[in-house]
Image (cartoon, rainbow, N blue to C red):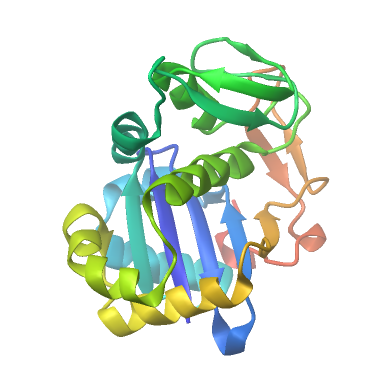
Amino acid sequence: MKVLFVFDDQEYSSFFVYDLTSGVNSLLRVSPEIKIQKLTLGELYTQVPIEKFLSYFSVAFSIEVKKYLILKKEDSLLGVKEAGLDEDGKMPVTVYKDFIALKNGQQFIKGEQRLTLDEIDAYISYQIDQDGRIDVFERQEDIIRLMKRKTVRPSLSAITNNYGTVKEHSGSNLNLKDMLKLGTGYLAKGNARMNKTNVPENGSYSLSGNFPYHLDRIDWEKNRVKLRSDLIE
């Protein structure tokens, strides 16, 4: 089973494809800046219904994805506010490298930090970092993982009991059987991280101008997951 998880921030949304086929757990992390002819993936996502986007996405990357789960960035921040902040209004976060956040111009320093809600917003907003890497995917996953540890006990009974809540507060076409399959795939993996691939992969793309960067040209031959050749501008 393949599930498209959308971290919804409009045209700057991040797209994650979880592959739990035959017990193989892997994750594709796809940039919203990839162009499908004239439109970026992020722009396309904001302009068509999610079912049509899934169809376009599947054709573009030759990956059949029919299931989806959408988490709006604003809802994730609301979850942080309600359950993740300590009494001082901050949350402990491990920053893995020095970088400047485009959203507020803040310099984040590698190491253990205590961040306010506004700082967390900047920390997980999509960007290409000064070193040319798309490491924001890892930051987004870390915040979601921290929230999961604070609020959800990963058990099959929890999935069953909270299925209605998940359906109510997220965009999804996952049924209970799908949720259980996703849950058993996750539980079988334990705390180990999935095999992850960025699309585009580091070293396969060039950047436009100076920081703040945007994707320019992508050498799809250097990527394991490729965009269909007739869709490349």
Give x and y (percent) for residue 218: 72, 48
Number of marks in the rendered image: 0
Q: Is residue 119 visible?
A: yes
Give x and y (percent) for residue 191: 63, 62
**Residue 69, placed above or below residue 46:** below
Please indicate whether residue 138 sits to the left or right of residue 57 in the image. right
Quadrant of res 173? bottom left
**Residue 197, placed above or below residue 75:** below
Q: Is residue 40 visible?
A: no
Residue at 57% across, 48% down: 34
**Residue 186, placed above or below residue 35:** below
Residue at 64% across, 81% down: 24
Please indicate whether residue 63 sits to the left or right of residue 175 in the image. right
Residue at 27% across, 80% down: 176
Give x and y (percent) for residue 168: 16, 58
Residue at 38% across, 19% down: 87
**Residue 185, placed above or below residue 144:** below
Q: Nearer the viewer, residue 214 or 72?
A: 72
Give x and y (percent) for residue 186: 53, 71
Q: Nearer the viewer, residue 92 or 69?
A: 92
Which residue lies most toward the bottom here? 22
Quadrant of res 110? top right
